[in-house]
Image (tube, coloured by chain):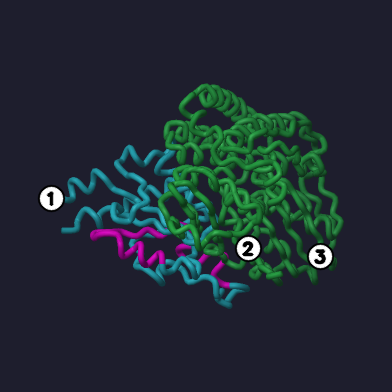
Amino acid sequence: MNENNKITEKNVIETEVAMGPVHSAAIEPYRVRLFVEDEMVKDAEITVGINHRGIERIMEGLPVEKANSLTEKICGICSNSHIWNSVLVAEKAIGIDVPERAQYIRVIMEELERLHSHLLYLAHGNEVLGHETFAMRIFYIRETVMELLRMIGGNRVQYGASIIGGVRPRCELDAMRIQKISEGMDIIEEKILDFADRFVSDPMIMSRITGVGVLTRKQAIELAASGPTLRSTGVETDLRTEMEAYEPFEFNVITQDDGDVKSNLLMRVLEIPEAINIIRQAIKHLPDGKITNRSWDMQDAPITKSYIEVPRGKLYHSYALEDGRVRNSIVRTPSIANIGAMQYAAVGHHITDAQLAIVQCDPCFTCTDRAIQIIKI
Amino acid sequence: MSLKSYSRARAVHIMLVYTGGCNGCDIEIVNCVLSPKYDAEQYKVFLTWNPREADVLVVTGPVTKHNEKPLREIYDAIPEPKAVIAAGACALMGGVYKNIHGDIPSEEIMGPVDNIIPVDAKVPGCAVRPEDVLSGVVSALPLLLDAK
């Protein structure tokens, strides 16, 4: 495995397997070049940029409320994370106090999103493994979360819960909704624990995923991987422990040791009960009061930054405010930090494991295609 | 019903092409064909990733610059008779990405899908609902079954 993040022996290795931009193994368009010798992957190269839509350019000069709803369209899996972080930037810049009830509802939405994102990862991972039965079971569990999201937000995918100063009135949680969320959590917990038992006690699955796509702790830190990909190598890092909205809740930061596909899959399996735990605490101690603070005035602000922990890692948004309009918007999504990890995880294994090693880092190439400038030093 | 259309009706293969949307529609479509709740496979609708096997092409996303050529190639590779379904607001009219600030067209977006390949059925929504996808596929079926 080459130590520097560049391809050194491209001229020596003759066999190249190229996949993409549209390929049967990858739902999203991206391009992978695998340099193969004796069916072992010696080097991998991932190219993104096929999805580039220039959303920061579209945000430039829009009123901040419109720009916030536009950030939701960056990604269909973690849409709530994007709108939440974008709203947080404006709240930080102007100095708006958010009512406590709104913070709780935002956390509930975020954790429901984490549930559906992790369940989707498990389903997709099992499908790539070739175990379609497990994938179907997980898709069935995921429907419960999607129905809860449709009930709260009105849409299965993009629900636009957060606005500047609180949450939208349609996302107010009344007694009936709280009852349904609590019932849904019971169903998911029961089914996911059942799944976890079957998953770890299946020798076929375990022997297939143990030791595949290994990423060492040193490599993960050097490549600046983030989120569950970094935690699966044993680094205990979770921005939720530092976020203001998560202060009232108690939860554990899950870590695994090996950094292979097994660790990554088990990470998600173990994070799902933690998310359910946070949702239960939130609906139990949900404070009364308003859900939106409307007593604020728009003012100009310099570039303000905000980091939050989303299902895939750290998400960064920043923009400046000028006459109530957005300037110099920058979005950095966690998948772009994990591209290096994907390339390294595939190296040194059989070519049939390459797709699995890429999928283990939970790639979302829709998020990833931001405007990036590569500076040659 | 001829023998050809009899056999076609019993194995409708859908191919999903993703041309740069936000992942929302794609997961809903995969969900509606595969997942046990909507389960289009019970109506003999299968998901495939091979254009040579496909009967119905489902396109999502606003067709970014780099995706235009692959989309044409995939469309040409599908054997006749074929049907194309554009799913989601982006595929129908470019969505939020097409026009920057009202009327300035974005240089990155070549869509909507209509500009590039002929579209037979349209499924609205952002993101599309699985029920609508199923009805869209059903409305495109006569094109396949009535072909000689």
Residue A262 shown left or right of residue A91 in the figure: left
Note whether A263 is above or below B110 in the view shown. above
Q: Nearer the viewer, mark 2 or mark 3?
A: 2
Mark 2, Cα crowd under 10 Å, few <14 / some 14-19 / many 20+, is many
| SS for dot 1 | loop
Q: Nearer the viewer, mark 2 or mark 1?
A: 2
Amino acid on which the number 1 mark rests in the picture? Ser
Q: Give the residue at the far front of this rendering.
A: A12
Tell me the residue at 81%/65% (across/down): A303
Amino acid on which the number 3 mark rests in the picture? Ile
Amino acid on which the number 2 mark rests in the picture? Arg
Residue A366 shown left or right of residue A329 in the figure: left
Residue B83: say if magenta: yes
Label 3 lies in what chain?
A: A
Return the mark for residue B2: 1
Give me the C-alpha separation between circle 2 and circle 3: 18 Å
Which of the two residues, A363 or A322, is positioned nearer the viewer here? A363
Give me the C-alpha separation between circle 2 and circle 1: 51 Å
Give the colour chain B carries in the figure.
Answer: cyan
Q: Quadrant where the C terminus of chain B lies?
A: bottom left
x, y percent for residue A312: 64, 46
Q: Is residue A29 visible?
A: no
* Residue occupied by mark 2: A370
x, y percent for residue B55: 29, 54
